[in-house]
Image (cartoon, rainbow, N blue to C red):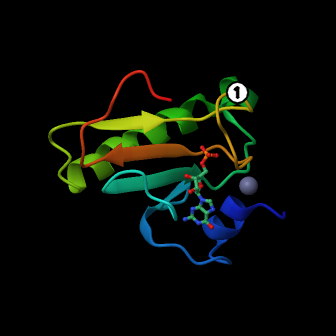
Amino acid sequence: MECLFCKIARGEVPATIVYQDETCVAFSDIDPRSPVHLLVVPREHIPSLAAVDAEHEPLLGHLLHVVSKIATEKKLTAGFRVVVNTGVEGGQTLPHLHLHLLGGRAMHWPPG
Ligand code: 5GP
Ligand code: ZN
């Protein structure tokens, strides 16, 4: 599978991994947009949030729980943002489902 996030999840491409379990991997974004900018990706190759179905519900819940645990570990007590860019208009650039965890500064709304 020639997918960057699959390769990172398999350890074939280096990344600064902050958390991993049998289901997902969390690592630092290579181009951080905030003091804390992590990506949480499932080990399963799912192209985007638009491609999930009912069988993925436990996985999706797990990914959000992992985000919450990492946010606590990173002491993001003032808040944080979770972003799932989806598809062309959603700004998705890599075709493997991933959650951005952004924190460490005040966020703006609406996002660009
Ligand atoms: P998207 O735009 O698809 O929502 O997010 C893709 C993210 O992957 C971007 O924030 C980008 O900086 C990050 N990214 C792209 N290539 C690499 C890489 O080789 N390593 C890491 N750690 N992040 C990457
Ligand atoms: Zn993949």
Up the image or down, 87 lies above or below 4; here it is above
* Quadrant of the displayed image that contains ligand 1: bottom right
- Amino acid type, label 1: Glu
Where is residue 56? Give x, y as percent.
64, 33
Pick the front one: 91 or 11: 91
Instruction: Name the residue rendered at 23%, 56% in the picture.
Output: 74
Extreme residue toward the front, this view: 112
Instruction: Name the residue rendered at 22%, 48% in the picture.
Output: 72
Report the quarter where the N terminus lies: bottom right
Where is residue 106? Give x, y as percent.
24, 37
* Residue tagged 1: 89
What is the crowding at mark 1: few (fewer than 14 residues within 10 Å), some, or many (at least 20)?
few
Position of 53 with respect to 58 (left or right) is: right
Position of 76 with respect to 21 (left or right) is: left
Position of 82 with respect to 54 (left or right) is: left
Up the image or down, 34 lies above or below 5; here it is above
Up the image or down, 7 lies above or below 48; here it is below
Secondary-structure class at tag 1: loop
Instruction: Name the residue rendered at 48%, 45% in the picture.
Output: 100
